[in-house]
Image (cartoon, rainbow, N blue to C red):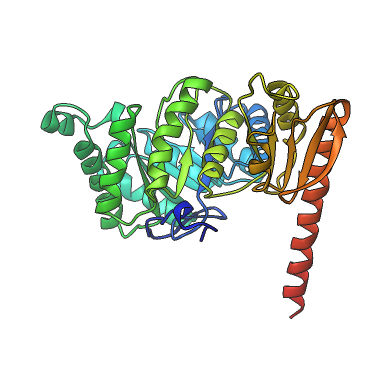
Amino acid sequence: MSLRPYQHIERNKTRQIHVGSVPVGGGAPISVQTMTNTLTSDAKATIAQIKRAEKVGVDIVRVSCPDEASTAALKEIVQNVNVPIVADIHFHYKRAIEAAQAGAACLRINPGNIGSAERVRDVIKAAKDYNCSIRIGVNAGSLEKHLLEKYGEPNPDALVESALEHAKILEDNDFREFKISVKASDVFLAVESYRLLSEACDYPLHIGITEAGGKRAGTVKSSVGLGSLLWAGIGDTMRVSLSAEPEEEVAVGWDILKSLGLRHRGVHVVSCPSCARQGFQVIPTVAKLEERLAHIETPLSLSVIGCVVNGPGEATMTDVGVTGGGSGRHMVYMAGKQDHTVPAEDMIDHIVELVEKKAAEIEAEKAAAKAKETSK
């Protein structure tokens, strides 16, 4: 429960599955996913890319497996990373079986394009045998022909009908360890499709606005769509789809979750857009602070405000704060209260030191509490 009732989001109740060690649905934290853009057959390059995503907090990573060389490399990839791997499979059922055998934690498929009922059963058997979950991935850009003929175009009813048809295939084979996505590049189409699907079933939902665009425009588009869904309590795991490196997708995903108070990781910076009143150059200061504090995983907040109009008020709600002052000195706040001033030339180094110290204190308190609980 949030500290203030108006900040509380009531998440939809869904059943829980697991993607490797990561629980999805059933009240588990909303997980952040991304997808590699290297050739999966190049295990070294793919592992390196996953490692970069791990550094910024990714929970689950998807890799494409279009051929035997990719599934052959998958075993090495899985063994050398620290997060569960989802194998993206299209059309060829043998790739799904090979991926399960190689250690994939989840298979992303459309049961309807895998082939005959027998082939679908073979994939499901492999998923059961190797403890894989499945993601049913419906996409507005690749909707089945019979649904396009029925509805005339991709629309929310068509996407939901596709998802439920695929879900029934798995249910008929006594398999329920799956999540569903109904992605579209159109925000309205995606949001309404997920809303209808959330009313129609209790399976965990993987949410995303597919093909959202480049880093800036895609971030805005994804924030609008995913923010709308998350605010409504919809979504158990998510990916921000950008024409950018995977670690950029992860960073944006975390920022969306942090902005809604749904998950917290690292330093949440509250900063002003700056104006003529600023006592220091806010824009480059924030950029430097974000860069130098990127290594911190402990959730805490920092306000960086250029003048005294909003600075003191914002500082009362953050762990550490700095407000622009006069005579080349700026006011530092700790735990919401005025604490001391710092010379302009020392401010960035000083704030970094304070934040790092605060993070260490929080981690020490957590460790002490855990040790005390364990000793009971």
Residue shown at 74% from the left, 68% from the top: 369
Q: In which quarter of the image is residue 367?
A: bottom right
Is any atom of residue 287 visible in this view?
A: yes
How far across and down, in percent of the image, does residue 339 sit?
82, 46
How far across and down, in percent of the image, does residue 337 sit?
74, 49
Q: Is residue 20 above or below residue 186?
A: below
Residue shown at 39% from the left, 35% from the top: 225
Q: In which quarter of the image is residue 226?
A: top left
Q: Is residue 77 above or below residue 236?
A: above
Residue shown at 18% from the left, 27% from the top: 153
Q: Nearer the viewer, residue 257 or 113?
A: 257
Q: Nearer the viewer, residue 279 or 258?
A: 279
Q: How many labels does the image show?
A: 0
Farthest residue toward the bottom? 376
Quadrant holding the C terminus? bottom right
322 to the left or right of 122: right
Q: Is residue 288 above or below residue 32?
A: above
Residue shown at 56% from the left, 38% from the top: 255
How far across and down, in percent of the image, does residue 160 sit?
24, 42
Is any atom of residue 80 visible in this view?
A: no
How far across and down, in percent of the image, does residue 117 sit?
25, 46
Q: Which of 84 and 103 is in front in this view?
A: 84
Q: Nearer the viewer, residue 25 or 36?
A: 25
